[in-house]
Image (cartoon, grey):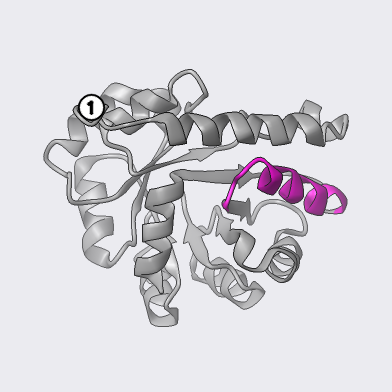
Amino acid sequence: MTASLLDRLKAEKIIAILRGVPKEQGDAIAEALSLGGIVFAEVTLNTEGALEMISDWREKFGDRMKIGAGTVLDLEGAKEAAQAGAEYLVSPNLDEAVVAYALERGIAVFPGAMTPTEIVKAWKAGATAVKVFPMGTLGVGYIKEITAPLDRIPLIATGGVRLDNIHSFLEAGATAVGLGGCLVNPPLVREKRYDIMTQNAADMVRAVRSWRPRGLD
């Protein structure tokens, strides 16, 4: 199950990160992203009503979307997310108990790491892929440097990825990217501009689909 989910992520290359969205707007936001072509969406557990949204979206979207839990900091959060139906767990940190639990349950797990040592440790612990964070600070050059020796490890670049640089992150070796504010941000949520969210998603999906690895143009 985790292998097939990773294969799908490698094809889609985008995880939408939904943090702090109001529960009463959650369905509309998820639908807007889905209409724009987003398949992977994670609700961070520090969002009020996150577990209910995860459960509701699993039922509503079925195979149309892959719904995960983000900001899974510890084993308790992992268990709550799994019970809610999360198909994958995403963390900003590496908690090996979370990774072990996900492996036991057959749930994909993307722990966060920054240094090569942390990335390899997460991979050896059983991570499905490793979230490299915070990319907004580290920059695309960092991904390029670490993928040279760590090219066997699927890396998800998170933070600082935008429409104007997403090709650079993919060219640098990122397997996928995590996107938050460039898809859904507080002003859009307040104004209920679901049409703009759909357009943002469609623009990002189009950018991913237009990218070709160097040498395959």
Residue at the (29%, 29%) spot, across then down: 171
User: Quadrant location of the C terminus?
Assistant: top left
Specify the farthest residue to the front.
217
User: Quadrant location of the N terminus?
Assistant: bottom left
Counting from the top left corner in percent of width and height, residue 35 is at 70, 45
Q: Is 81 placed above or below 122 here?
A: below
Counting from the top left corner in percent of width and height, residue 86 is at 58, 68
Q: Amino acid at mark 1?
A: Arg
Say which residue label 1 marks: 214
Specify the farthest residue to the left.
149
For the residue pair 188 and 200, the one nearer the viewer reads as 200
Residue at the (26%, 65%) spot, across then down: 125
From this viewpoint, is residue 22 visible? yes
Q: Is residue 150 magenta?
A: no
Main SS, magenta region, reads: helix
Residue at the (17%, 44%) spot, across then down: 151
User: Helix or strand or loop: what does disc 1 sit on?
Assistant: loop
| Quarter holding residue 32 | top right
Q: Is 180 placed above or below 138 here?
A: below
Counting from the top left corner in percent of width and height, residue 53 is at 74, 61
| Quarter holding residue 4 | bottom left
Q: Is residue 38 magenta?
A: yes
Counting from the top left corner in percent of width and height, residue 158 is at 45, 37
Which stretch did the figure color magenta?
24-39
For the residue pair 201 and 49, the one nearer the viewer reads as 201
From this viewpoint, is residue 138 visible? no
Q: How many marks?
A: 1
In this rendering, position of residue 55 left or right of residue 104: right
Residue neighbourhood size for the residue with mark 1, other residues' Cα within 10 Å, grouped as few (<14), some (14–19), many (≥20): few
Specify the farthest residue to the top.
164
In this rendering, position of residue 111 left or right of residue 75: left
